[in-house]
């Protein structure tokens, strides 16, 4: 079951301590992200107006955030006019209750699913299983994760941490196919045969959405496999769960995003399957369509003028693929269905900076800036990370009565830096104080916070003369 | 031409040789260098760790210390980026319009060393001689926040006797990231191990960069592993001549 949720069970350093030991995962991630990075560069270089497209995407998203309420009301009216039903869910609990009720009302005991990340955000599968409804993920990678009772580790490629040998073993065990090889073609064939039967019998489908057009009430999904197309067209009832930030004003706006999204995510000029539907139509497709609009913390994110750009995200995962922290620690270290740089700014904002596991996520970055360069809608992730660090520090200060080592040390250092003569004195003090710790001009093992450095790295000792002393003598 | 040297707190304390090299190099290129003695730290460590209240006085102090400088030159891409990229945001966030205005006037005059040489002085051949096998690591903030581009590489290509060896995955972060290196020490070390592997593969004697913070990280790992490759700041290579070798 791929119900990751967005509440990290551990702090990032604690979670990464475990995931960093997974050599197989690190090799898989290194290989996959390297391949996609190289391909992506080529696909983007061939567009002469990539920077203008990014700028347009960013402006459009800013417009949507500034006009979210009227756009959502327009969307509701358009979907209703086209024969769909719109539901509003304040939080995960409400959304789970709405979807579960809608499924139970159809009498169906099985549902097929596609584009499941938002449903994973609210742990929908768990709620449905508890109500006696069996869920089946139909995106190949989501299916792998579900069969393995694992959690997704990448937005676009949820099973990126598994290689084909591991997938073969899983299919042999779970699908009862002892003769299967680890050839990707054969593995995909096995999944296809398994899923095809389910598509033909499923009465209800649950999907996510990439876009919804306020003007027309059209909802859209982009995908690679065509399994989504089956989910969206074959069952009689279609329930789509969508974050409120996914609305776009006009059909024409897709011109921007359908160029940005596939190139940024899978490094393709165009994704293989793009499905759009508007309400219901007699004799074609589902007979009933429900659109569930999910808040679940998004309006709270919107309140933060700096942090709100996290809502511009179109879930392309380009920031994951270029992130050196993600590549080493892997998606599971972030403890949320939204991993990587975007997860580090989205998860703590969605659930609140007071969560002491989630508020370690903004610190899980070296601020190298690769994510900002890669983002197709120009979310300044490093800027938001630093902003959220300040919010985390503020929270810690106002909610803890214990003296905190880091805060005390940094305040003392700031005081020293406040005046050049204090700084000069501190330099001399450090030179004297380090005496017993210095060996061959290096500091080998330091206590406390600095021990994190010297566990794996030498530190140069403070030399006999500072630069300002040299300047005084020589200039 | 006159320029003020912003040495940075790290170089002042731990890497004075880089400051000496920067001074001698700029003087050799005809620049009159001054050192405003009241300077301390740009506030980056505090700002990027989330201690914005503590960073603000340091930001004000920097603006005050360099108010009268024609140019501010620093041998650190990261500290130059702090001033140019973060100061405007910090001033705005503090709601201080006067500070924002002063930052706006100051930032166009602040340069990382290689930028100053290639961009302001318009030089590529600085008359340096450094007969060693060298690989260059482009530091993240110089590359992505300052957009120094291939300036440092063009400078290195003109250094006499120097053999420049290409570093694989050069644009990937070494894992330093300021307090990240201690707050997330294990992830930082995992990033460092890959960077070090690439450096060692070049068989270079020297790994250089425009920032001693990143070099302190890479060098700290190389030294711990007895890898036999040393780290040298770009300024020290460019300052070296046939008459005087720095590092």
Image (cartoon, rainbow, N blue to C red):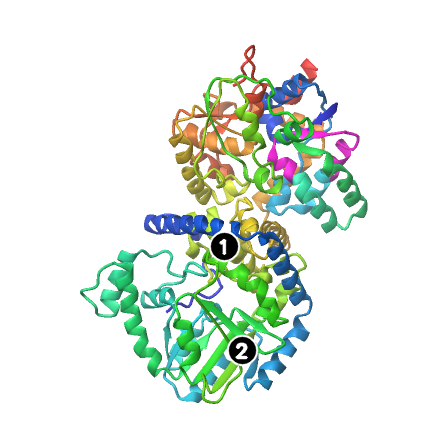
Residue A431 vs residue A339, the one in the foreground: A339
**Residue extending furthest left?**
A179
Give the residue drawn at x 44%, y 54%.
A333
Q: Earlier in the sequence, mark 1 or mark 2?
A: 2
Q: Is residue A33 left or right of residue B145?
A: left
Q: Nearer the viewer, residue A328 or A193?
A: A193
Mark 1 nearby-residue class (10 Å; few <14, some 14–19, many ≥20): many
Q: Which residue is mark 2?
A: A292
What kind of element bears circle 2? Answer: strand
B190 vs B159: above or below: below
Residue B78 sits inside the magenta stretch: yes
Task: Give coordinates of residue B55: x percent, y percent.
Answer: 68, 42
Tell me the quarter of the image containing the N terminus of chain A: bottom left
The subunit carrying tag 1 is A
Q: Is residue A375 above or below residue A250?
A: above
Chain part drawn in magenta: B60-81
Disc 1: which residue: A318
Report helix, strand or loop for mark 1: helix
- Co-location on one chain, circles 1 and 2: yes
């Amino acid at each position: 079951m791929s119900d990751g949720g967005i509440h990290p069970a551990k702090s990032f350093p604690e979670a990464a301590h475990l995931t960093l030991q997974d050599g197989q995962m690190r090799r898989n991630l290194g290989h996959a992200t390297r391949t996609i990075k190289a391909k992506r560069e080529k696909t983007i270089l061939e567009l002469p107006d990539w920077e203008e497209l990014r700028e347009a995407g960013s402006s459009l998203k800013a417009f949507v955030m500034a006009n979210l309420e009227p756009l959502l009301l327009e969307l509701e009216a358009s979907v209703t006019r086209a024969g769909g039903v719109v539901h509003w869910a304040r939080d995960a609990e409400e959304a789970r209750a709405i979807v579960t009720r809608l499924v139970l009302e159809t009498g169906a005991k099985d549902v097929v699913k596609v584009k499941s990340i938002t449903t994973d955000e609210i742990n929908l599968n768990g709620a449905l299983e508890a109500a006696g409804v069996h869920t089946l993920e139909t995106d190949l990678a989501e299916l792998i994760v579900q069969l393995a009772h694992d959690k997704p580790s990448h937005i676009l490629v949820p099973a990126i941490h598994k290689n084909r040998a591991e997938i073969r073993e899983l299919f042999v065990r779970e699908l009862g196919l002892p003769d299967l090889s680890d050839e990707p073609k054969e593995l995909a064939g096995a999944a296809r045969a398994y899923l095809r039967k389910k598509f033909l019998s499923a009465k209800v489908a649950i999907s996510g959405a990439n876009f919804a057009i306020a003007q027309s009430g059209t909802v859209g999904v982009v995908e690679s496999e065509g399994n989504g197309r089956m989910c969206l067209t074959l069952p009689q009832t279609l329930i789509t769960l969508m974050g409120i930030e996914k609305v776009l004003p006009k059909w024409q706006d897709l011109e921007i995003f359908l160029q940005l999204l596939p190139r940024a995510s899978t490094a393709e000029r165009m994704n293989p399957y793009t499905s759009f539907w508007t309400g219901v139509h007699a004799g074609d497709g589902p007979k009933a369509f429900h659109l569930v609009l999910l808040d679940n913390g998004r309006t709270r994110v919107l309140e933060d003028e700096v942090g709100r750009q996290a809502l511009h995200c179109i879930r392309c995962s380009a920031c994951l693929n270029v992130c050196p922290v993600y590549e080493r620690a892997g998606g599971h270290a972030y403890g949320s269905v939204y991993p990587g740089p975007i997860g580090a700014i989205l998860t703590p904002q969605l659930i609140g900076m007071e969560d002491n596991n989630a508020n370690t996520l903004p610190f899980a970055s070296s601020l190298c800036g690769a994510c900002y360069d890669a983002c197709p809608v120009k979310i300044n992730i490093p800027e938001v990370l630093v902003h959220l660090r300040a919010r985390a520090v503020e929270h810690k200060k106002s909610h803890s009565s214990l003296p905190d080592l880091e805060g005390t040390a940094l305040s003392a250092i700031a005081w020293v830096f406040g005046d050049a003569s204090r700084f000069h004195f501190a330099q001399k003090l450090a030179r004297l104080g380090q005496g017993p710790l210095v060996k061959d001009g290096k500091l080998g093992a330091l206590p406390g916070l600095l021990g994190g450095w010297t566990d794996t790295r030498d530190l140069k000792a403070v030399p006999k003369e500072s630069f300002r002393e040299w300047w005084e003598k020589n200039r | 031409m006159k320029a003020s040297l912003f040495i940075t707190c790290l170089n002042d304390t731990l890497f004075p040789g880089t400051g000496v090299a920067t001074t001698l190099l700029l003087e050799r290129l005809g620049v009159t260098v001054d050192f405003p003695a009241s300077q301390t730290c740009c506030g980056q460590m505090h700002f990027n760790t989330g201690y914005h209240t503590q960073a603000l006085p340091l930001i004000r102090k920097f603006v005050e210390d360099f108010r009268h400088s024609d140019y501010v030159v620093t041998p650190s891409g990261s500290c130059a980026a702090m001033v140019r990229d973060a100061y405007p945001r910090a001033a705005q966030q503090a709601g201080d319009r006067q500070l924002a205005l002063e930052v706006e006037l100051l930032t166009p005059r602040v340069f990382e060393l290689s930028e100053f040489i290639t961009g302001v002085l318009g030089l590529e051949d600085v008359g340096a001689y450094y007969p060693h096998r060298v690989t260059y690591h482009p530091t993240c903030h110089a590359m992505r926040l300052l957009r120094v581009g291939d300036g440092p590489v063009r400078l290195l290509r003109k250094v006499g006797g120097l053999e420049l060896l290409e570093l694989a995955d050069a644009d990937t972060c070494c894992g330093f990231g300021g307090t990240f290196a201690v707050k997330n020490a294990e992830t930082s070390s995992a990033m460092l191990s890959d960077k070090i592997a690439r450096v060692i593969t070049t068989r270079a004697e020297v790994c250089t960069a425009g920032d001693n913070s990143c070099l302190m990280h890479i060098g700290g790992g190389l030294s711990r592993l007895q890898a036999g490759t040393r780290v040298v700041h770009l300024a020290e290579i460019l300052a070296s001549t046939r008459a005087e070798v720095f590092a």
